[in-house]
Amino acid sequence: MGTALREVRRVAERTPPSRERFIDLLRAVSIVAVVLGHWLVTVVGHDDHGELIGRSALPDLPWAHPLTWVVQVMPVFFFVGGYANAVSLDAERRRGGTATEWLIKRSGRLIPPTTALVLVMGGGALAAGLFDAAPARVRTVVWLASIPLWFLVVYLIVVALTPPMYALHRRYGLAVPPVLVLLVAAGDVARLLGHDFWGGGNFLFGWLAVHQMGFAWRDGLLPARPRVAVPLLLAGIGALLLLTLAGPYPISMINVPGERLHNMSPPSLALLAVATAQLGVALLLRDRAERWLRRTRRWTAVVAVNSVIMTVFLWHISAAILLTGVLHVAGVLPTPEAGSAAWLAWRIPLLVMCGVVLTLLVAIFGPIEVRGAQRPRRLSLPTPAGLARMASGEGFRPWLAVAAFAGVAFALLTNSLWPSTAPTVSGMPAVALITYLACAALLRLLRSTPPAAQTEPRPTPHARPPSRLV
């Protein structure tokens, strides 16, 4: 632990003056808000057979729906992702690398912590089977623990599309997001007409639109000035009021079971209006936040959170499940009615205890994410020599990298769409688990095997120093 803290301080102290520290703060705040939101909005009870069940409390809390305009911060994460991906892609190209090498290296921050969760879930499911646990029940627990993985499916695809989308940004600038917004609008119309399949493209178009705005911030097209920020804020709020109060969109920006149209899954025009308002607020706060983050302790805390941010996100549902299970077995699990005074009072100790459990999980699995951000050692035997040569070959690497990303996304999506009570031996569909592990191993091989032809870095005057946190 002491070594990790010293490393965090070292990274914080070496931060170049040109770094946009506010971006890192936004990333940390967005993920922490998601974690707290999931913990706060969950209600736990028992079914007719005395088994534990969990669900969203939002259907019972209509007064809380407007609050989701503030706490729905996933657009902030994708916006920050666009900024960070643009920075790291440019840095890779300045070093003489290619988009393929950037994509392969980017997988180091995303895949290893995810693999840890997948392996633990699979191992836990197999162990539960040895103790005659009901397979359907085990599948439900694994499905709940893997809820964060739905987000990773979309983000992996967005990351893989970063090179071509950034090229479009460089050529057409702020003309790209409106096109994506029009595609989202078309998807919303299809959903309103009952053709939900054609609205599924909004999962991609909506988040790509927000991601593009991160490119725009990074390239200076969105200066942190009131003349830019205030119109964005007012336009976002105005569109949001129009779409939700006069239009067909629900008020809640978090999916509420039973509603005809959802704003979050997939993203709707209403959610993009929220994203626009949030972008305006971020631009207004940028300069003040940058000054605030010049203090060493504050910036070190932001660096510490960002170094394990994927681990925090991936394991926060598991932390709640573990805590709930322990309290249930001990016979001290409160199950007050959602929205009652007892339920609201229980939120405070719940947050504290979930935070303690998550801290322990991050202490165990966080180092995997930290190591994943570094270049892995070159693989030695028993790696087949022919496979290693294929992984380093100039012609094969792009196809292998894209196929591996697609395979991981397919596996995680399959697990999310598989029925939550369908019995499976490992808690996940066999095809999903096998595909995921094979593609994760392929990405590990690609990261550890340098390309056949390495080019020397091209020095660029006044180039921004790369950072391991980007």
Image (cartoon, rainbow, N blue to C red):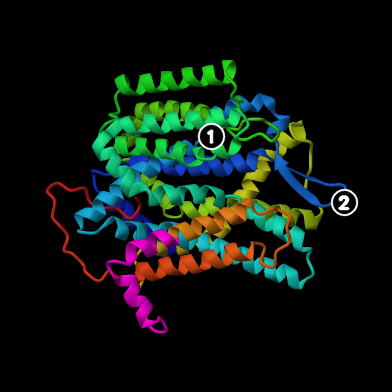
The residue lying toward the viewer, choosing from 264 and 290, is 264
Please tell me whether mark 1 sits on a helix, a strand or a loop. Answer: loop
For the residues bearing labels 2 and 1, Cβ distance under 8 angstroms: no
Which region of the structure is painted magenta?
Answer: 381-404
Residue 364 seen in the current view: no
Main SS of residues in magenta: helix
Q: Is residue 321 above or below residue 26?
A: below
Q: Residue at x 53, y 18 (%)?
A: 241
Q: Residue at x 79, y 43 (%)?
A: 335
Mark 1, residue position: 72
Q: Residue 222 is drawn in which quadrant?
A: top left
The residue lying toward the viewer, choosing from 240 and 179, is 179
Q: Is residue 326 above or below residue 53?
A: below
Q: Is residue 441 above or below residue 25?
A: below
Mark 2, residue position: 49
Please tell me whether mark 2 sits on a helix, a strand or a loop. Answer: loop
Q: Residue 65 is drawn in which quadrant?
A: top right
